[in-house]
Amino acid sequence: MTLLEVHELNTYYGESHILRGVDISVDSGEMVCLIGRNGVGKTTLLKSLIGLLPTRSGEVLLNGESIVRRSPHQRAQSGIAYVPQGREIIAHLTVEENLLLGMEALPGGLKRSSKIDPIIYELFPVLKKFLSRKGGDLSGGQQQQLAIARALLGEPRLLLLDEPTEGIQPNIIKDIELAIKRIIRETDIGVLLVEQHLHFVRQSDRYYAMQRGGIVASGETGGLSKSIVDQFLNV
Amino acid sequence: MQLILESLFNGVAIGSVLLIAALGLAIVFGLMGVINLAHGELMMLGAYSTYVTQLVFKTPLLQPFYNCYVIVSLIVAFLVAGIVGILLERSIIRRLYGNPLETLLATWGVSLILQQFVRSVPLAYASGFIITILIGLILPLIIPKKVHHHSRAYVVKAGVWGISVLFGLLSANWLATSISRIGRASARNVDVTAPMWMRGGFDFLGITFPVTRLVIIIITIISVFSVTWFLNQSVWGMRIRAVTQNREMSECLGIATNKVDVLTFGIGSGLAGVAGVAVSLLGSVGPNVGGSYIVGCFMVVVLGGVGNLLGTIIASFSIGIMTDLIGAGRLISIWPDMPTPLASTVDFFATTSMARVLIFALIVVFLQFRPSGLFPQKGRMVEN
């Protein structure tokens, strides 16, 4: 079943036209990767989907429901979780508080009685050790794990990941990859990911390649040829 | 010993007035980064609320409970200033987030409007207006959720405001007829008279502690503890802390940031109202009473380190103690055989206004060396 459908999406920064008629779709239980060189509009697309950037025209459907007119917090409550580039951990809050805030997206929001699902510590054991530390004091890799854990606690149906492997050491990339695959398998969520890391790209089911604000190629990642890789990835 | 104790008490008393006045600002300016020049006028509204509450408690119906009017007026002042603050946020400040200069000008304008408002609108009708808005805001919370999503929800909404206006008018009318003093507009200063139990002093170790001062210290302590608890332990407090640090990400996590803004501003303003109660107990209340506190409030918040509650507390008490040390010329009584030139300097500064001048000068010098105050933010996250 189609989880996310995007039709003819156009986004502007001021007067400059960034996204030009983007069409994509993501199914439940599927990992879809967005590739393309720097500055082609990948992050802009994710920000338009979560609602941080206003879209001028086009349609975004989540489970068949239009969400274009909703604000970011309403989209989060409808089931979209967003892990931005640079992680955006709330620096002066503890790791535990950051995790608790992930549950704001649940129906009814965070409550005093809300408890952190222990599966998070199974996926990212390091977080349990640092629960009472300030989020801003964690290393980049730990912050990335925290950001993903925080997103998952909202029990999303669609997870948007912006360059989860950027500037992170290889063993943590492996952990993140395993965690995401396990979550897709167990909860059947859809994942839309922006990635430059070729190994990670190959883990996805399908890809969309972007150029100058539009989708120029798409297909199964199994059929990702060397010429496409050379054309769209910074490797 | 006696001297030190007395000096300490006076310092703490001055400091607690500063602290209670600056506490709301520490939230609005320190956490939200909004420069609200109308903060003093919100205090003034709190002081007028105390005055009206006191008069209401003089009516035959409430006369037997006259002694507890101070406690009731704390709640009234919090609500009045909080509601005006919420109106201010919704109508003006919301549109100016991220534009500090425009905010500064706009809130200064609001402060002038509020000053003129209490001069030219009879207090009875002002109270009626506040009651209207209070009922209008609270009634929808009691109505079951289902009604709000009904297709005819606007009828209910209109009905709610109709009822609120009716209640507001009735109460304004009642206030105007039964308390003639607030039925007419007046620009003159008014006096809040403390109830019997708050007059006089309390003797301890040979020193007299004025009860009003003790009450203000207690109000301050309670306010500080409730604010700290609220910000650090409650769910809404955590939302406030999250939104003040990272608005965009908080929004993406599912926090309704506009609601958090309203709440934060409402609480900050409400605390200004509570400070107004303290101010009304110290002297007469006029439309300009807020102006004399606003500069001190900003000084305290900046000196303590913006966004740091502990810093605000320490800064206000140190300013309080210094004011007493300098303003009352206590150095001479502590060290009687001071050389004459020094003694005359100390004597020169031994008035309230000169002490203020000296302290502001000292703060300015201090900020040259520590521009971000006593407790600057430290660590890896400063750059973010």
Image (cartoon, coloured by chain):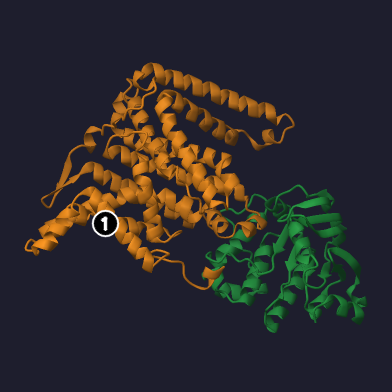
Chain colours: A green, B orange
Kind of residue indicated by mark 1: Leu
Q: Identify the image quadrant of residue A193.
A: bottom right
Judge from the rendering whether residue A114 lies leftward or rightward of residue B322; answer left or right.
right
The residue that appears at 20% across and 54% down in the rendered structure is B349
Q: Numbered disc 1: what chain?
A: B
Residue lying furthest top: B177
The residue that appears at 43% across and 64% down in the rendered structure is B372
Q: Which residue is mark 1?
A: B358
Judge from the rendering whether residue A222 lies leftward or rightward of residue B304; answer left or right.
right
Residue lying furthest front: B341
- Whether residue B326 appears in this view of the structure is yes
Q: Residues within 10 Å of mark 1 (few under 14, many from 20)?
A: some
Judge from the rendering whether residue B343 lies leftward or rightward of residue B84; answer left or right.
left
Which of B327 and B80 lies nearest the eye of the viewer? B327
The residue that appears at 39% across and 20% down in the rendered structure is B184
In this rendering, is residue A216 above or below A170? above
Q: Identify the image quadrant of residue A186.
A: bottom right
Q: Position of residue B226 (x, y in %)?
A: 41, 50
In this rendering, is residue B56 above or below B366? above
In the picture, which quadrant includes the N terminus of chain B?
bottom left
The secondary element bearing badge 1 is classed as helix
Q: Identify the image quadrant of residue A39.
A: bottom right
- Whether residue A3 appears in this view of the structure is no
In the picture, which quadrant includes the C terminus of chain B?
bottom right
Q: Position of residue A68 (x, y in %)?
A: 78, 50
Judge from the rendering whether residue A202 lies leftward or rightward of residue A148; answer left or right.
right
Q: Position of residue B166 (x, y in %)?
A: 54, 21
